[in-house]
Amino acid sequence: MSKVDVIMPQMGESIAEGTLTRWLKQIGDPVERDEDLFEISTDKVDADIPSPVAGTLVEILVEEGSTVEVNTIVARIDTQAGAAGVSETERPKEEPRETVELAPPEPPATASSAAAPVPPAPSPTPPAPAPRLPEGGTAAEVQTREERIQTKSTPLVRKIAAEHGVDIADVAGSGIAGRVTRDDLLSHLETRTATPAAAAPAAASPSVTAPAAPPAPAGQPGSMQVPIHGATLEIRIPAVPIREGDTVEEMSRVRLRTMEHMLMSRRISAHVTSVNEIDFEHVVRLRRKLKPKFEEQGVKLTYGPFIMKAVIEALREYPILNASVDGTRVVYHRDINLGIAVAVAGGKELIVPVLKNADQLSLMGLTTGANQLAEKARTKTLDFDDIQGGTFTITNVGVFGNQFGMPIINQPQVAILGTGVIEKRPVVVQDTMGNDVIGIRHMSYFGLSYDHRVVDGAIAAFWLNKVKDVLENFPEDVI
């Protein structure tokens, strides 16, 4: 047989794992190259993953509902014509030549442990039927195989179980062969939290198992693993008291990945934020003039494309803000790929699709591209390429009415722009005679967070001033 490994793909630069939600093929099924093989879900996107080769699916190594790290082998495909429908490991074992009665169960053994064969115990009466072992097998090995199926789960499930003091063996599993999935564990935790503490049981007889103790009233301290440039940083989490009336809710996968990515970014980059105030009066009038032309093309024109145009011009003039840090090297990106933060799930989650080669697009192209990406993000139809390769990110905190924001850099980028609400404010302006007067203008604050390892305050100020100049003097004939 000529087997090819199928791996869990990386669905974005910041994504370290994915959940295999459904197998579209089963062991023994023929598959064509690029034919959909399984479905995965990450904090950024859901997608069908195609087969890398044509052949027969002979091994499935990751069950439905399991969350595994990227590059984990999830299956194997035999590319030889006429390959058997199942792998050698999936074939039924030959019947042993003799039946061995198992001794009482021993403590669980690890996969690498070696135990001596268990001889049959003498008995005056015929022994009850016992499980059959492969030749040379031991009771410890059988127990290990059962554990591997019933209690061994993904790293994420084991981590959550450890943090909440849960024995996975006590959780009913809905995965393949009864394995416990993340959803099984979360449901178990919800049930345990909702169940009032039972009264202390009376002394139990040897044949009665005492119920598990109720959860402690106060949250237990834990830790979180954060990847940083190939290493792992363990962050200690203090205990949180949980009082009567409090509601406890597990973080979603998107929330967990966002937390890890933001903490990682704060520890990698030396964050500094500079703020500038921009007069949008000219852009407001220009947008009002252009809206009918865009509506004729079925396109809704917002302020976003004007801001993107200004950002692109500033990045061209100051390319250090369109760069990344690689160890002690600075990588200046040729393309300007704009990440556009989009709030989803009613504002509870955030995703950043990427508008590729934005510097090559017109105002119409920027408008169309940004609108399409935002719609795909909200309908969860983004694909691989939509979430990768960003070189600079824009996040609009003004859409929620905020004056300005100081956003966290989206690694591996070195800067991110937070745009505030555009609203009318009284400001000092000059009349036609050059006199200072109070006027009403549409104004906005822009906050630029940048990595002080490579971007100094002066360059950040020059960059913001360039954005301001472009917006306040936007060309009338742009489309």
Image (cartoon, rainbow, N blue to C red):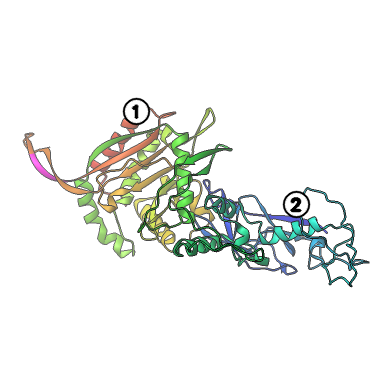
In magenta, the rendered stretch is 438-442
Q: Nearer the viewer, mark 1 or mark 2?
A: 2
The picture places residue 167, in percent across and down from the top left corner, at 60, 56
The picture places residue 298, in percent across and down from the top left corner, at 33, 65
Q: Answer with left or right where residue 184 lies relative to residue 239.
A: right
Depth check: give the residue in front, 155 or 359: 155
The picture places residue 159, in percent across and down from the top left corner, at 57, 50
The residue under label 2 is 109
Compared to 278, does 292 lie above or below?
A: below
Pointer 1 local density, CA inside 10 Å: few below 14, some 14–19, many at least 20: some
138 is within the stretch colored magenta: no
Helix, strand or loop at label 1? It is helix
Helix, strand or loop at label 2? It is loop
Pointer 2 local density, CA inside 10 Å: few below 14, some 14–19, many at least 20: some
Depth check: give the residue in front, 320 or 198: 198
The picture places residue 275, in percent across and down from the top left corner, at 28, 36
Instruction: Please tell me the numbered disc located at residue 457.
Output: 1
